Amino acid sequence: MKKIVLSAIGKDRPGIVAGVTHNLFAAGCNLEDSAMTILEGEFALLVIASRPSKISMKVFQDRLQTLAKKLGLVLNIKEMEVSRSTSVKNPRSAIITASGTDRTGILYKISNVLAKYKVNITDLSSRQIPSPGNKTLYVVMIETALPKTLALEKLRKHLKRVATSMRLDVTVREIAVEKL
């Protein structure tokens, strides 16, 4: 088996997930990881799948490009290098949330702090939400992998300084991960 990363973007409509997953299934692929969302009417899909080596990458790509044209998607497929170990080396994680009046730079300033502390962002979702008085709220939720040696209180203090300067509410909550 070989692994692929597949991304697709297009105007949202029913049937996109069914069409893509049907083609993956018909090609003998196993869907291993995925993220799908709608952003302002655009559907975005990101999938990692293993595919049988017996199907050439060209045949596989041609099959999916035909589907992409039919569904109006921009599609990208890339082969991945398969890592030997899929075990989690550091099970420490945290959820960071921030909200406040929308303004330029919120996500940059938060992610910059995380980068300084070598915190890896594993998932991120953000939205603008209309609120009374013609103000727009910005809400972000960030799932992270924390370095083993990071003192969470140090990260919290730095993020609170950013929050104060940008008039945001920020929370940092460590998540307990049970070992299997």
Image (tube, grey):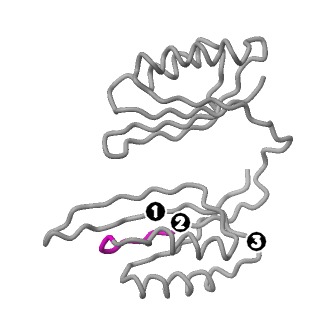
Q: Which residue is mark 2?
A: 95
Total tally of numbered discs in the picture: 3
Q: Is residue 31 magenta?
A: no
Residue at 44% from the left image edge and 82% from the top image edge: 163
Q: Which residue is mark 3?
A: 148
Where's the N terminus, which quadrant?
top right
Amino acid type of the residue that numbered disc 1 sits on in the rendered structure: Met
Query: Of 78 and 86, which appears nearest the observer?
Result: 78
Alpha-carbon distance for marks 2 and 3? 16 Å
Residue 26 image offset from top left, x and y in percent = 59, 11
Amino acid type of the residue that numbered disc 2 sits on in the rendered structure: Ile
Left or right for 2, reference 152: right
Relative to residue 105, is residue 30 depicted above or below? above
* Foreground disc of the pair 1, 2: 1
Residue at 49% from the left image edge and 36% from the top image edge: 45
Amino acid type of the residue that numbered disc 3 sits on in the rendered structure: Lys
Q: Mark 3 and 1 residues: CB-CB less than 8 Å, in contact?
A: no
**How crowded is the residue under tag 1: few (<14 C-alpha within 10 Å), some, or many (20+)?**
some
Relative to residue 88, is residue 103 depicted above or below? below
Q: Mark 1 and 2 residues: CB-CB less than 8 Å, in contact?
A: yes
Residue 141 image offset from top left, x and y in percent = 46, 62
Query: Of 48 and 69, which appears nearest the observer?
Result: 69
Residue 92 image offset from top left, x and y in percent = 68, 65
Q: Quadrant of residue 72?
A: top left
Alpha-carbon distance for marks 1 and 2? 7 Å
Q: Which residue is mark 1?
A: 141
N-term mark: 3 or 1: 1
Please identify the dominant SS of the magenta region.
Answer: strand
Residue at 33% from the left image edge and 25% from the top image edge: 14
Residue interval drawn in magenta: 96-102
